[in-house]
């Protein structure tokens, strides 16, 4: 296992007092290790889980060439410069194939999804075929120039090929992946075990819900945002409550987290000059680095290991907790879950306002992205205080003002990390 000193030695220009956001991601990528244990789950239990192995398809989907339209199937080689007249000799339905042989000059009425009769490769949609019913039978006429050979036919295996990986190890199973596996007839799937994450809030001024308000105290919000973020990520959560600033209580919480969880997330108590015992206890129980990150919001952060658990000691301010979670903790947890890295996508949007920004730190401003005349634009949510949690509810993305970036002028393009619906 990499010690923190080891990791630090591998990183160029590592400075715990002025760490760039990208250096934080890099450090964490070295620190965390994916879970190994796997279990088998049925399709309904697989949502949000991470594949431990490639899913090799036992079948091709679709299993046969079939029609993409309701119409008439025929051999496309007969198409030419003049209209093509064909006798209708039978019907192929989805689930009921036409078994006969079709000769030149003949076609088969076919429905969407029906297997293409032997030797036929093209379907004329019914609305393009002129149908005539006569005593000797039904004919269609296909006007010239509308179709090419092979049109409106779905090829066997065009979705998934038998024997190939339909999904790859590390795929986080979203609704489409569940459906895809079901389309292969796979009833159960092997996934990595769920990541267990313990969390608690620290600070003598933090009230649990239900406690009587008192002057100078605030209700705990971080445990609820962290609970929500972890649950949506598919982690198993262990809620250790609000832990008061007493060494014995902090020790017990850290030890329980280290015993039961793969990761421990705390909030509060890691600022420089913080007068409480959180940092002391982290130092005493684990291998922990205390960082000042060149970012806003969320400058202080503690990171390391307590026992086998990875520690993420987040700042106390509610917006800083969410921002550091999205920027740093989420990618690290996904790596621990064994998921292939898929960072939140950055959209480019035009800023409707000027934003002041100092080069030399990364800023994450809460913004609202909307589409105006087909163009993405973004405005800030106003007060960007790191305690203004309503800004995270109001906004739908974080305007990411990168490390070297300076002031933004009206109309400038900025990157936005969307979080609404994504986390
Ligand atoms: P700290 O990092 O402990 O200095 O906390 C910074 C600010 O965040 C202080 O104003 C705290 O009261 C506030 N804070 C810390 N933890 C929480 C929490 N769990 N819920 C809401 N606010 C918090
Ligand atoms: Mg505090």
Image: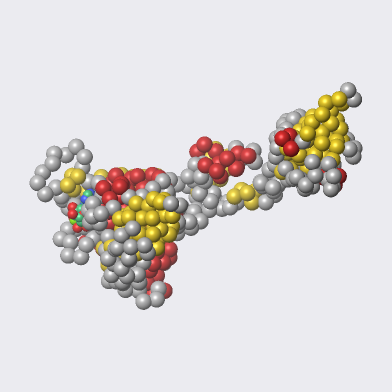
Residue occupying the far bottom of the picture: 13
Using the image as rendered, state which of residue 109 and residue 224 is in the foreground.
109
Q: Position of residue 138 (x, y in %)?
A: 84, 28
Residue 376 rendering spot, x and y as whole percentages: 42, 54
Q: Quadrant of ligand 2?
A: bottom left
The answer to whether residue 40 shows anywhere in this view is: no
Image location (x, y in percent) of residue 164: 67, 51
Using residue 284 as the reference point, say whether residue 411 is left or right of it: right
Up/down of 111 relative to 273, above or below: above
Query: Between residues 87 and 181, which one lies in front from this camera angle?
Result: 87
Query: From the image, which quarter does the N terminus lie in?
Result: bottom left
Q: Identify the coloring.
A: secondary structure
Q: Quadrant of residue 104?
A: top right
Residue plotted at (36% across, 48% down): 229
Is 370 in front, or is 271?
Answer: 370
Residue found at x 44% / y 55%: 375
Q: Residue at x 25, y 56 (%)?
A: 384
Q: Residue 383 location in percent, x, y?
A: 23, 55
| Furthest residue toward top | 135
Q: Is residue 189 visible?
A: yes
Tell me which corner region of the image, top left, top right, bottom left or bottom right, holds residue 128. Answer: top right
Q: Residue at x 48, y 58 (%)?
A: 341
Q: Nearer the viewer, residue 80 or 95?
A: 80
């Amino acid at each position: 296992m990499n010690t923190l000193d080891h990791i630090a030695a591998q990183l160029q220009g590592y400075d715990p007092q002025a760490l760039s956001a990208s250096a934080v991601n890099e450090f964490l990528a070295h620190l965390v290790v994916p879970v190994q244990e796997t279990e088998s789950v049925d399709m309904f239990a697989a949502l949000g889980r991470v594949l431990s192995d490639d899913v090799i398809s036992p079948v091709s989907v679709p299993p046969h060439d079939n029609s993409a339209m309701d119409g008439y199937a025929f051999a496309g080689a007969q198409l030419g410069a003049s209209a093509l007249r064909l006798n209708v000799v039978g019907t192929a339905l989805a689930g009921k194939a036409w078994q006969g042989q079709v000769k030149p000059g003949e076609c088969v009425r076919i429905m969407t999804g029906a297997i293409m009769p032997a030797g036929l490769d093209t379907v004329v949609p019914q609305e393009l075929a002129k149908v005539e019913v006569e005593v000797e039978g039904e004919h269609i006429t296909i006007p010239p120039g509308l179709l090419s050979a092979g049109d409106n036919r779905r090829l066997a295996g065009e979705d998934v090929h038998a024997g190939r990986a339909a999904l790859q190890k590390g795929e986080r199973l979203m609704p489409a992946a569940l459906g895809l596996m079901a389309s292969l007839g796979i009833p159960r799937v092997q996934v990595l075990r769920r990541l267990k994450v313990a969390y608690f809030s620290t600070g003598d001024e933090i009230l649990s819900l239900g406690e009587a308000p008192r002057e100078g105290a605030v209700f705990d919000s971080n445990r609820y945002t962290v609970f929500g973020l972890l649950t949506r990520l598919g982690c198993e959560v262990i809620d250790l409550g609000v832990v008061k600033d007493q060494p014995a209580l902090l020790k017990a919480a850290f030890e329980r987290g280290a015993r039961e969880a793969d990761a421990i997330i705390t909030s509060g108590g890691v600022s420089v000059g913080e007068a409480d015992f959180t940092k002391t206890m982290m130092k005493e129980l684990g291998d922990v680095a205390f960082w000042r990150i060149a970012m806003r919001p969320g400058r202080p952060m503690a990171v390391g290991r307590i026992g086998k658990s990875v520690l993420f000691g987040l700042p106390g301010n509610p917006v800083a907790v969410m921002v550091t979670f999205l920027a740093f903790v989420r990618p690290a947890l996904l790596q621990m879950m064994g998921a292939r890295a898929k960072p939140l996508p950055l959209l480019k949007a035009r800023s409707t306002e000027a934003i002041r920004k100092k080069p030399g730190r990364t800023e994450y401003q809460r913004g609202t992205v909307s589409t105006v005349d087909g163009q993405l634009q973004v405005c800030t949510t106003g007060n960007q205080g790191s305690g203004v949690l309503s800004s995270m509810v109001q906004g739908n993305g974080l305007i990411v003002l990168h490390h070297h970036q300076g002031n933004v002028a009206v109309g400038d393009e900025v990157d936005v990390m969307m979080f609404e619906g994504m986390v």
